[in-house]
Image (cartoon, rainbow, N blue to C red):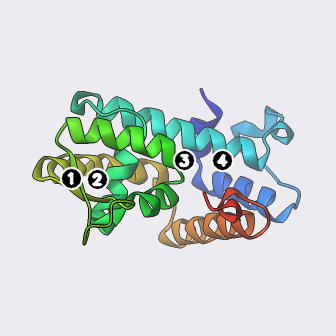
Amino acid sequence: MLFYDMMMQKSSLGMDLLLSFLIRRPLQITSHLDSLSLSCYTLHYLLMANHMTFQKQLFANVRGLGLSAGQPKVLDYLQDHDGSSQKEIAKGCHIEPATLTSLLAGMEKKDLITRSMKEGNRRTLYVHMTKKGREIQCQINTEFNKLEKIAFQNMSGQEQEQLIRLLSLVYENICENGGSERNGN
């Protein structure tokens, strides 16, 4: 059984484990994980493992939609920011501008988005979802919701809110103290 799966079976253990890394206190484990050496699981490892597991499951669930890596994230961003500039999308999705340009070209070929200039400004292109893009975004949203439900199973509402709050704090701390956001990405 994967470590991630074991954590998700015991949400209080998963929350305690995350909290122990965030506040650097010793973790008292009282479950079938007692025999595992958890000291090798650092915050960066757990964040990466959760991200990769979530992403792999998402792509397995949306395989039939013909999307490539990065495209669900862009559609998700456009759901709330339709008509954004490419620069805004790159920043909001944490994607390099050159990478985004290539993603958008593929999405335009698939009729998921359109790009246009405003008021003759040739330097800035604005991106809008097409009807087909909105339909696919609805399917992606459904899959995101399913995965979030799985990730939050066995957690109380208070634990879910606490996890979101703590992960938001981690994000803010990294951005404020040397993360990629400081470099404009």
Residue lying at 30% horizontally and 34% vertically, measured from the top left: 67
Quadrant of the image containing the C terminus: bottom right
1 or 3: tag closer to the N-terminus:
3
Q: Amino acid at mark 3?
A: Glu
In the displayed structure, 168 sits above or below 111; it is below
Which residue lies under the disc numbered 4?
A: 47
For discs 2 and 3, the disc positioned in front in the rendered view: 3
* Number of other residues with Cα within 10 Å of mark 3, as a class: few under 14, some 14 to 19, many 20 or more: some
Quadrant of the image containing the N terminus: top right
Which residue lies under the disc numbered 1?
A: 138
Q: Amino acid at mark 4?
A: Leu
2 or 4: tag closer to the N-terminus:
4
Spatial separation of the CA atoms under disc 2 and disc 3: 24 Å
Tell me whether circle 1 and circle 3 mark residues in contact (CB < 8 Å). Answer: no
Spatial separation of the CA atoms under disc 2 and disc 4: 22 Å
Tag 3, which secondary structure?
loop
Spatial separation of the CA atoms under disc 1 and disc 2: 5 Å
Which label was assigned to residue 96? 3
Tell me whether circle 4 and circle 1 mark residues in contact (CB < 8 Å). Answer: no
Which label was assigned to residue 141? 2
Spatial separation of the CA atoms under disc 4 and disc 1: 26 Å
In the image, taking residue 84 as reference, residue 30 lies left or right, namely right
Tell me whether circle 3 and circle 4 mark residues in contact (CB < 8 Å). Answer: no
* Number of other residues with Cα within 10 Å of mark 4, as a class: few under 14, some 14 to 19, many 20 or more: some
Tell me whether circle 2 and circle 4 mark residues in contact (CB < 8 Å). Answer: no
Residue lying at 79% horizontally and 33% vertically, measured from the top left: 36
In the displayed structure, 171 sits above or below 73; it is below
Residue 30 appearing in the image: no
Tell me whether circle 1 and circle 2 mark residues in contact (CB < 8 Å). Answer: yes
Tag 4, which secondary structure?
helix
* Number of other residues with Cα within 10 Å of mark 2, as a class: few under 14, some 14 to 19, many 20 or more: some
Nearest the eye: 154 or 94:
94
